[in-house]
Image (cartoon, grey):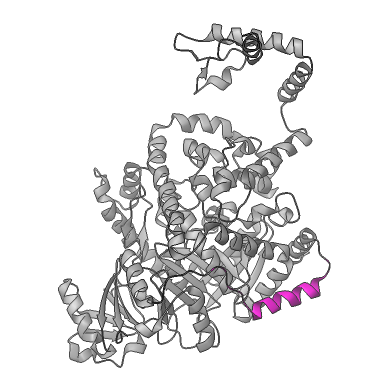
Amino acid sequence: MAAAKHSQAMFFQARAGEKIRNKVLQKALQKAKPLFVGKRAKAIAALPDDGFEFEALRTACVDIRNRVLGDLDVWLELFEERARATGAEVLWARDGDEICELVIDVARRHGVTKATKSKSMLSEEARLNEALAAAGIRPVETDLGEYIIQLAGETPSHIIAPAVHKTIDEVEALFAEEHGRPIESRTSADIPAMTREAREVLRQHFLSAEMGITGANFLIAETGSAALVTNEGNGRMVTTLPKVHVVITGIEKIVPTLEDFATLMRLLPRSATGQSISNYVSLLTGTKQPGDGEGPEKTVFILVDNGRANLLGSAYQEMLRCIRCGACMNHCPVYFSLGGHAYGWVYPGPMGAVLTPLYTGIENALDLPHASTGCNQCASVCPVRIPLPDLMHRLREEQVERGLRPWSESWALKAWAWLAGKPALYRWVVRRVSRYLQWLADADGRIHILGLAPGWSVGRDLHVPAGRTFHELYAARKRA
Amino acid sequence: MSARHEILQRVRAGVGKATYAARRAAAEASLRAPLRGPQPSIGDDLVARFQDKALSLASSIERISDPAALPGAIKRFLAAGGLPGQAVVSADLASLDWLGSGLEVAVRPAVDADRVGISSCFCAIAETGTLMLLSGAETPATVSLLPETHIALVPRARIVATMEDAFALLRAERGGLPRAINFISGPSRTGDIEQTIVLGAHGPCRVHLILSGESL
């Protein structure tokens, strides 16, 4: 798969250890988690005040997404026809490389030297910024979080809060260098001034760029429009000021009508940031119209597959319902122990643990479907009820079916199965193991280095098991 | 094979249904009669609801009885806030008596140097305290975007309950969609540095709403 060449997902375990030991990262994550969880919980709890039931809204959102996926061929052609009728150009890209080729071609046709970007995860799938820079076109990320990580030369670690892993001191060092000033000592009271500084620098880019590049939260088939949801207003800037607007979006992002869009908007911001609505919600249709004093002269939609079509009709089709709210990662204990970079590709957290193997090859992301505690919080908060743990289980099964698991694992499971079929021997072995673990433990009842599997005890201790096995205790109780 | 052809072929294989023409007809029929999802119950006092929600989104609000009083109200608001008396105004409000108010206004799309932008709105949504603005020759989108202060006239009669009601109004009053429909809910904001909310990320840091019309 083409996307695999940029994936670092096979290094998940090595990165996980590194991220757990990174104290700066851990501090940033511990600060963010209660905010994400608390804001969403409050917003969902307030739904009944407006006469809504969360489950009824979820059902409505699931129905809309399923309706589209069930006839996606029809909806894609309808969207394409209606978008063209408004004067937009509609192009198609099989993969990330084709996205880059198409965007660069549009840029060259219109003499573009600088492109301002509103956050687009698909452009991360395509590594578009690198391709643009190589073609002599300067990409400028304008979402504040994306701007920060572009300065740092990093990738987003969260789909809606890309710089969640950065502390104020790190941001200050990046701003000082890029904006040509000395580093100052900063506290949270300085965050408004730092935001102001970025606003002034980015304003000049907004005004001078010839091309604006955005994703789309949704494509609306009825009107041929792109829907863009932002809080900062950068999405409005890059779709209003440059003469060319390019929308890069996955083929699964279609919703049929404006009413369907309104329904999804009741859960998207609440699930993402706990807002009842995001500050700016824009529906962008065609190009500037006769008499308009502003707006793009050229609008191009790039509809992207990059692995999506293969999920239709598969055991993983439900994943295509995803509306990219980020609630699954915001509620994931694995995500908040490691941050997003450990996952090694564009999408982190539970949705990334499913999407990365599916889009880059199951064999190229073996650890990700195992990066789960099975707590099911992701599925219980997902606004479109994607059964994320079930999909991770299915991916694990597929690893076994395709012989992708290490020989030691299958050997160990076979040995256990053999042993479990021989009750007397099983009891004898379990007794021995229990005694062995007690012998390994220190005075506090903790095992620091697990003899047969030392890797397991790096970064965590094992509690010593109770003195006797279940069978021994059961037998003793029956006698008593 | 073109990318379009190949992707659509893959999608068709994944969808796995043969009856394209019938499915297409059903999809088009569903677009002609759009269905609403669950609707909120927010009471009958849409103006009060709109005000509550807009205030909670960090907008400020005042009321005037007659739109003709708008220039004077804005003059007082700007003076009280120590804000400049120069503003860019969208063309649909050009006929008001700006000169008489002592404000210095320009009727055009906004530019970077403009500090205050004054616009109307197509309608407003009570459920979320949101303005709905349509781009157009008379209503340039930059007026509500580039200046630090955005002041909007909201006629009470144009406050509807939901986004669905706003779309119904749009379909009834306009033929098609403008280049941009912008739903605006308070000042621009970001939380990207250590999750600390700051107003005025890229758009206005101040949104002042002036409700016009007699209360019932």
User: Against A430, is B114 above or below?
Assistant: below
User: Against A148, is B75 above or below?
Assistant: below
Left or right: residue A442 versus residue A379 is: left
Furthest residue toward front: A480
**B73 vs A475, nearest the viewer:** A475
What percent of the width, then of the height, locates residue A387? Answer: 63, 48
Q: Give the magenta part as a residue range.
A: B18-38
What percent of the width, then of the height, locates residue A238? Answer: 45, 68
Furthest residue toward right: B18
Left or right: residue A169 versus residue A445 is: left
Left or right: residue A50 versus residue A397 is: left
Q: Quadrant of residue A102?
A: bottom right
**A20 vs A439, nearest the viewer:** A439
**A405 vs A271, nearest the viewer:** A271
What percent of the width, then of the height, locates residue A42? Answer: 41, 53
**x 54%, y 43%: residue:** A377
How many numbered discs sit on the rendered protein? 0
**A388 vs B88, nearest the viewer:** A388
What percent of the width, then of the height, locates residue A344? Answer: 56, 41
- Would you say residue B30 sits in the magenta stretch? yes
Magenta region, main secondary structure: helix
Q: Quadrant of residue A50?
A: bottom left
Q: Is residue A231 at least partly visible in the picture? A: yes
- Would you say residue A185 sits in the magenta stretch? no
Question: In which quadrant will I find the C terminus of chain A?
Answer: top right
Q: Is residue A209 at least partly visible in the picture? A: no
